[in-house]
């Protein structure tokens, strides 16, 4: 299967869900750290 | 006099339920957006970026409207829970706005041929991002809980004015951005049904994610407020 602009689509989804995962990790860290 | 209430245990119980619902909703939305939805006739498969770009933009609007409502509620009642809701929603709104700008840029490169364009919606969104980063910074200017919450509430009420400006900017000025295709005044989306369903599914999934992040962030802020009140005696 040939998907046009696959690199841009992959980059978009990785950035989006990567950022959400990082924010989630920061919340866990802050909760554990008792901030 | 500032009023304080304890964190309800219902919010602590809601977190794992919302977490599980977020994962399920995101899997369904990702399948619809990446596999089930057809490529666009003009822009091809790159349209798939728009499902997350638009969902992030709408959730940013929602987050800043929640800041506005919580700010009014705080000034009205002086209950610290509303200040916690406002700061949590502003922080998550900044995350969604930042993602909207980055995803828009990644989409624009293969579609418009540029990473960035000084066109009205992009500029007003960037201004909205900067204003709410300023809102979060302003909160750190004072250690006094009441003063900080009051200042932030006033700013939270004023800043919401940019939300309709961002949304309507494409209709007021000549813009590269397309005109609204879903949130139209006549409520008749001009979109392929499968594309519309994918966009709605992604928006629902992000709304559940927003609810999950809010519960977690408000809980952290409530503990912080309780420590400040305790230290003050």
Image: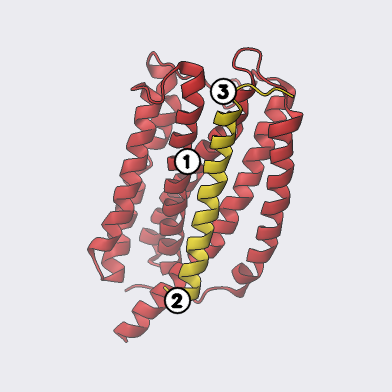
Q: Which mark is residue B82?
A: none
- Residue position marked by numbered label 1 in the rendering: B99
- B134 above or below B191? below
* Chain identity of mark 3: B
- Mark 3 vs mark 1: same chain? yes
- Does residue B67 appear left or right of residue B204 in this picture? left
Residue occupying image coordinates x 52% and y 42%: A15
Disc 2 element: loop
- Residue position marked by numbered label 3 in the rendering: B184
The chain letter of the red chain reads B
- Residue position marked by numbered label 2 in the rendering: A34
Instruction: Tell me the distance, in whole angstroms, between the alpha carbons under discs 2 and 1.
Output: 27 Å
Quadrant location of the N terminus of chain B in the rendered image: bottom left
Q: Does residue B161 appear in the picture of this structure? A: no
- B68 above or below B220? above
Total marks in image: 3
As rendered, which of B55 and B153 lies closer to the eye?
A: B55
* Chain identity of mark 1: B
Disc nearer the start of the sequence (3/1): 1
The chain letter of the yellow chain reads A
């Amino acid at each position: 299967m040939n998907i046009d602009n696959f690199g841009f689509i992959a980059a978009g989804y990785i950035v989006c869900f990567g950022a959400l995962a990082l924010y989630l990790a920061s919340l866990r860290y802050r909760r554990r750290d008792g901030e | 006099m500032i009023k304080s209430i304890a964190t309800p245990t219902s919010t602590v119980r809601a977190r794992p339920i919302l977490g599980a619902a977020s994962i399920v909703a995101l899997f369904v939305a990702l399948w619809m957006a990446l596999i089930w939805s057809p490529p666009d006739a003009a822009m091809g498969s790159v349209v798939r970026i728009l499902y997350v770009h638009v969902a992030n933009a709408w959730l940013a609007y929602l987050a800043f409207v929640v800041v506005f409502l919580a700010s009014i509620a705080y000034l009205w009642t002086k209950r610290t829970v509303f200040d916690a809701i406002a700061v949590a929603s502003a922080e998550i709104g900044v995350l969604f706005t930042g993602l909207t700008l980055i995803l828009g840029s990644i989409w624009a490169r293969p579609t418009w041929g540029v990473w960035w364009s000084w066109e009205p919606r992009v500029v007003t969104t960037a201004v909205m991002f900067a204003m709410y980063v300023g809102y979060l910074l302003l909160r750190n200017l004072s250690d006094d809980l009441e003063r900080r919450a009051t200042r932030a509430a006033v700013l939270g009420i004023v800043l919401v004015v940019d939300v309709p400006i961002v949304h309507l900017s494409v209709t007021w000025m000549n813009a590269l951005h397309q005109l609204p295709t879903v949130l139209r005044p006549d409520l008749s989306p001009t979109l392929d049904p499968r594309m519309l369903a994918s966009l709605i599914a992604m928006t629902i999934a992000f709304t559940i994610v927003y609810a999950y992040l809010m519960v977690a962030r408000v809980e952290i802020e409530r503990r912080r407020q309780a420590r400040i009140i305790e230290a003050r005696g």
